[in-house]
Amino acid sequence: MTATRSQRLTYAAAQTARVAFYGAHYLAARVLARDAFSTMEKLPHGIPSLRAMGKAMAALFARDWENVQAGLYPMPVDIGESLKRASNSLRYLTDVPRVVKRQKEHGHSDVPEGEADLPRYFRQNFHYQTGGYLSAESAKLYDFQVEALFGGTADAMRRRAFVPLAKHFDSKKRKAPPKIVDIAAGTGTFLSFVHGARPAWKLTALDLSKPYLARAKKRLGDAVEYIAAPAEKMPLKDASVDAAVSIYLFHELPPKIRTAAAKEIARVLKPGGIFVLADTIQYGDVDGFDGLLDAFPQLLHEPYYSTYAKTDLEKLFDGAGLKRVETDIAYLTKVAVFAKPGARRTAHRA
C-alpha cells in the first residue's frame, strides 16, 4: 500500500493535534495537582527527560504509520469520533478538582454501591477517578481521561494490540470468521477500531462494569456481543474463542486474581489460539523509564501496580499453559502475545 504525500501529512497533522490537545489537558491537571507532586516520596529511579519521552513517542507514531502503509489497518483519522471526545473537555476539567481532592485525602472507596456480587478489588476509585468504574458519568469521561494521561498517545498504543491479531488471522484461510473476546473491554474503544478494520470478525466485549458496557453498546450496537463478567470467571465454554485480548487490565488485578485470569484465558482459548496482553511497560523494558513506574502508583490510586510492574509474565502464563511468542514495546505499553499449543495429531496406522 503506497501512501500519498497528502495522506502522510493528514496523518501527521492529526496526531500532532491530538498530542497538543490532550497534552494541554494533562498539563492543566498536573498544575491543579501540583501539591501531590511536591509531596511525592523520593523515587528509586530517575524520571526520563522530555527529549527521551518525545523520541519514544515519535517512534510510536512512526510504527503506527508503517502499519497503515502495510495495510494492517485504515488510517486512524476519524474527525467525528475526535470531536465527540473533545466535547468532554469541560467535563474533564470540571472533574479534575474532585480527583485532586480525593487524591489528597487518599479517598479511593467513595464509589457507588454498585452490585453486591462485584469483587472487592473492583469496587474502588482506580486513578482516584470519580465513580470508579461504576457510574455512567465515569464511562463518559474514561476515554478522555486515558488520552489526557498519556498525552494523546493511548489510541496509538492500543492499535499495536491489533497487529498480532491481524497477522495471525489474515495469514490463514478460514471457513468462518474468528471469534475474539476483549477482556475488560470498557467502553468499547478497542473493539470499535477492530470492527472498523475487520467487520466480519465475531467480537465479544466482556467487562465487570455494566455502565461501561452500556457505553460500548451505544457505540457499537449489535455488532458485538456483551457479557458482564470478571476475567477470572468468564461464562464462556472451554476452547470457544480463537483469540482473547486484554488492554490495561492486568495491572489492576491482585496477584492471585491475575493467576486465576491467566488460567481462565487458557481455558476459553481454542488450541492454536492466541492471547494478546497490552499493558504498562515493566521494570527494565525501556532504558531510563523505570522512574515513571515508581511515580505512577504514588500519584494515582493503583494498589496492584507495583507488583504487576515486577511480574514475570512468561512465568505467569506458562503456568496456565500459554507460551510467549512475541513482545513489542509501544511507548509506555508492552504488547505480549501468548499462544495455546495446537491439538496434537493422532498417528493412524495404514
Image (cartoon, rainbow, N blue to C red):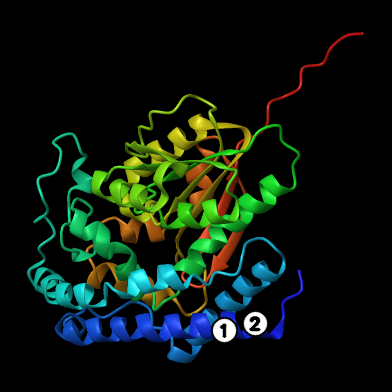
Residue at point 52%, 77% (across, down): 287
Mark 1 neighbour density, 10 Å: few (under 14) some (14–19) many (20 or more): some
On the rendered structure, is 44 left or right of 14? left
Residue at point 14%, 84% (across, down): 35
| Screen quadrant of the N terminus | bottom right
Residue at point 72%, 36% (across, down): 174
Q: Is residue 202 above or below residue 98?
A: above
Q: Is residue 251 above or below residue 332?
A: above
Q: Quadrant of residue 2?
A: bottom right
On the rendered structure, is 319 left or right of 205? right
x, y percent for residue 268: 50, 31
Type of the residue with mark 2: Arg
Residue corresponding to mark 1: 12
Q: What is the number of the mark on residue 237? A: none
Mark 2 neighbour density, 10 Å: few (under 14) some (14–19) many (20 or more): some
Q: What is the number of the mark on residue 8? A: 2
